[in-house]
Amino acid sequence: MSILIKNIKQLIQVEDESVRWVAGSDMSKLPLLKDAFLLLDKDEIVDFGLMKDCKYSADMEIDAAGKLVFPSYCDSHTHLVYAGSREIEYIDKIKGLSYEEIAKRGGGILNSSKLLHDTSEDELFEQSFKRIQEIIRLGTGAVEIKSGYGLNPQDEIKMLRVIRRLQEASPITIVSTFLGAHAVPAEYKGRQSDYVDMVINEMIPQIASEGLADYIDVFCDKGFFTVEDTERILMAGMKYGLRAKIHANELDFSGGIQTGVKYNALSVDHLEFTGDEEITSLLDSETMPTLLPGAAFFLGMIDPPARKMIQAGLPLALASDFNPGSSPSGNMSFIASLGCIKLRLLPEEVFNATTKNTAYAMGLDATHGSICKGKKANIFITKEIPGYEFIPYSFGSNLIEQVILEGKIIPMSR
């Protein structure tokens, strides 16, 4: 079916040829058309331009007068396949316990691991599918989902199989990342190298044989996995064609950013602790620095030096880190607001960071992240608003009126 969207007040993130990312001062430039049209046919963007030049008709026409049209958000870092919730730990945080203190008491990732172990694959799928439906209505059209709450071969594979089922059942584009090295299970306390051996020798080969993952990740940080652990796991993953995406420098200067660059990681994520050495290592690399302001906000942690990174000429991506313990929200409009409020980014910078640059951080820059002929027909239409700046300004409001994924209109009612 063809869809013609007419009288668009602002058509955001338009480009004649796909550019893989924007960096440095270019992040403050957001290409758009006013009083525009957009033509979709089947699952692709066919054409766009000024309304005065529109000569098309279509099977369905949508009048977007007073409204904005965006390419769907791309959320390049989530853990949305999980069992249950962890609001009791949230109360512990309010009382003053740190993330590390909660983890040492058996909370955190290990708590989610136990809940996941006790949950059937079907129930895990049902819980996760509801979250997928929620983020679709909030404007996300592509999402990366990690494993990492299994922490043993059977449960990690259960998570990855659920991700595959979500790919098959949902119109949203999903990429899958294996994160067996998310934490050290309690039974391996004092034997961390043995757990790393199991990740390398048991998990990776089986996951690769079933084609369950697109990428491999490691939590390379203080109290979790060392640089040496990380390098061993990444080298093993590379043998099976799994490119790296690294959790790095959330809790301290860990060497994770430099390790990610060394192994040509597609992205290094979190980055609260980023200094001159880390910035220098990222310059001229193909690794996308990805900030997760929802986690820093929820945990009350320091914010990464986003402005310094852009001024150095780096690209930046912003993702939700949707997970039960440190960022229980997949609302990318709110992430855009946090980018402005907490990281002092401009609205233009946050929209580049949540569409084009996050598409690159998922390996989807050729098909997602902008309004470009031939790209996926994944877009959202806002309510009547003054302009794109109004979205991060009005934090907490859902300003999305209509979502189209793969060229199909998504019902917005629950």
Image: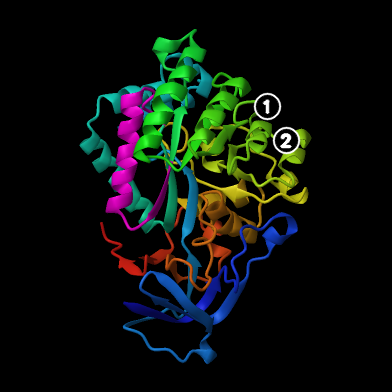
Q: Quadrant of the N terminus?
A: bottom left
Along the viewing direction, whichever of 219 and 353 lies nearer the viewer = 219
Left/right placement of residue 23 relative to residue 402 reads right
Q: Residue at x 49, y 89 (%)?
A: 54
Along the viewing direction, whichever of 167 and 67 lies nearer the viewer = 167
| 208 up-or-down from 402: above or below | above
Image coordinates for residue 377, horizontal then vertical, percent:
42, 68
Does residue 82 show up? no
- The tag on residue 336 is none
Task: Name the secondary structure under disc 2.
Answer: helix
Q: Which is more N-terminal, label 2 or label 1?
A: 1
Q: Residue at x 36, y 58 (%)?
A: 137
Pointer 1 residue: 253
| 358 up-or-down from 246: above or below | below
Is there a contact, CB below 8 Å, between mark 1 and mark 2?
yes
Image coordinates for residue 161, horizontal then vertical, percent:
31, 38
Pointer 2 residue: 278
Please tell me whether residue 293 belongs to the stretch shown in magenta. Answer: no
Q: Which residues are magenta?
A: 148-176
